[in-house]
Amino acid sequence: MYTPFDFNEAIGHRKEYIEERLREGSPVVGLAYDGGMMLLTVRRTQRKIYEIYDRQMFSAIGNQSDIEQVRLAAIQRAHKEGFDRSPDDVTLHRLVGFELSPAIKRAFGDQLTSPFVIKSLFAEIGAPGREDVFLVLNFDGEFRQLAGAAAIAGTQVAEDRMMERIGEPSPARSRDAAMRLALSAWIVGAREALRPRGGHKDEDDLDMLLSSDSAVDESAFLRDELKTASVEVGVLERPGGRESRFRLLAPAELDPMLADHA
Amino acid sequence: MSNGRFEIAGDFWSLLEQSGHPLTRPPSAHPAGGSAGHGLVDTHGTTVIAVKFDRGVLNVGDRRATANFAVMYDRAEKVLSVDDYTLLAISGSFARAMDVVRYLRTAFKLFERTYLQPMSLDGKLAELARAVREGIPEVLQGIGGFIPILTTFDKAAAEGRIFFYDGMGARFESTEFGAAGSGSLQIRGVFDYIVKTKKPFHQMTREEALKEALYLLDIAADLDAATGGWSKVLPLAKTITKDGIEDVSDDELRELVREIERKP
């Protein structure tokens, strides 16, 4: 017989399964700055930050095919809404709250479906008179809205430490200052997520590198990561001449920030 | 939703089909479907003209939209951008044409955001052909037909290009010029006369080509009852070059129009 206990147990197992797979995902940081909003991450071969619609962008950690599913679903639903009504009517709140979250929650709770292994971070630059919004969507369908700053990482502790590093959000920051802060928060999150659990310190070298918070060690960690990866920054800029506000920053725009860690 | 996961459509057209959007639905399926003669008169855009010039391609159109013998609107915009380098000049049924323009804008953006690269020119032309073709059932019922001219700047070839369609969705590329709408037949031969006696449009400067296009529009307005002149409202003109789409300013148009009118 299937009991409520079994349901709890099964959900617990699913949660554990997903969290284990998300653990080593490269964190993503979202920050507002004086000219718009940014998402920053470090990626290997696969691009990680994507445009969804005129005012929306997205990044995620998790299973690549699940990321593509959520990305395509978000893009298609946003374009359908924009066509049926108006591009101004496309909002993250509706997109995530009414379209993505219910489906992800259903897949998570349905024992016969494989759950989405994904944690997503969306950003939306507000239309005139509307707020800028970050929205974090979890693998169980839960979502929360944030203003000014947001972070997703493989573990809750890593996310907490990233938000600590970011501190009080300050949308008046310049893009360069925001980018430096976002990168520093990424380092904190990535190091935390890689930290061995439960006190098993069999990888001494790694632990040495991870346990210190000094700026020198953080730079060393970043340099090490960047041997096989690169920093990716996507921005939504305040309305200019073009309809589309999203772009990925060019490598040359990242160089001054990376020089700090050389 | 299938399998508890997301249902993803192959492209924007199928996405609209799934939801039964009227653009993709043959009118026989409409509750009020039937033959023309229900008293429904759709609004039509009249004459649009596209010609090449040495740095790209330009479009001009009068501002009139008519329904039978009534002038519905004298500030209609019939040259519309569908992306940063592509203009659609529309003639015929306004309602469907405007839907198609919005459809193309959305479909091109959706494609680029999905596949992380812009849709190819051939892909765009095929999308437009489909949108025209799918309107045939409406045309057969006496409403809804429209004929577009698509102009774009081909970056690979570094030149402007002009494509026109027939009512079935067949696509043709024109080397020099294109025109559609009620006044286009009356001026068809004038294009050839200009090319043969002056020079090909693609060798003209922007100013030369613009002036010829305005002359053509003026003749169309003289010979076609539905085409609006410019006595009250200036025509609309846009260019596409390697730098993208640009509106020809009202001041420049006003000056050219005055110059044309000064001639006997």
Image: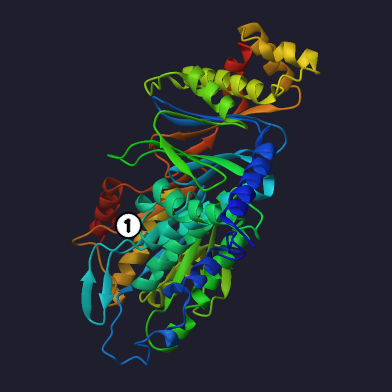
Drawn side of residue B64 relative to residue B84, left or right: left
Q: In which quarter of the image is residue B161?
A: bottom right
**Residue A138 percent location from the top left of the image:** 54, 42
Where, by quadrant of the figure, is residue A208 drawn? Answer: top right
Q: Is residue B27 above or below residue A173?
A: below
Q: In the picture provided, is A176 more to the left or to the right than B41?
A: right
Does residue B204 lie above or below A137 as drawn? Answer: below
Q: For the residue labelled by badge 1, is the local secondary structure a helix, a strand or a loop? A: strand
Report the label total. Answer: 1
Where in the figure is residue B116, as x and y percent of width and height?
61, 47
Depth check, front residue: B171 or B142: B142
Horizontal side of residue A46 vs B133, given as left or right: right
User: Mark 1, chain letter?
Assistant: B
Three-letter amino acid code of the residue under disc 1: Leu
At x 40%, y 73%, the residue is B184
What is the x, y in percent for residue A193? 65, 26
Instruction: Work out whether residue A141 or residue A64 is closer to the camera in this orientation and state it.
Output: A141
- Tell me if mark 1 has few (under 14), some (14-19) or many (20+) residues whose alpha carbon lies within 10 angstroms of its own: many
- Residue B157 visible, this angle: no
- Asked which colour scheme the image uses, the reply is rainbow
Residue at image position (66%, 60%) is A112
Residue A55 or B179: which is nearer the viewer? A55
- The residue at the point 57 percent across, 23 percent down is A253
Position of the N terminus of chain A, as image quadrant, is bottom right
Q: Looking at the picture, does residue B70 appear above or below residue B250?
A: below
Query: Which residue matches tag 1?
Result: B236
Q: From where the camera sits, is residue A48 visible?
A: yes
Give residue B84's position: percent from left, percent from top.
Answer: 48, 48
Q: Residue furthest left?
A: B232
Q: Quadrant of the C terminus of chain A?
A: top right
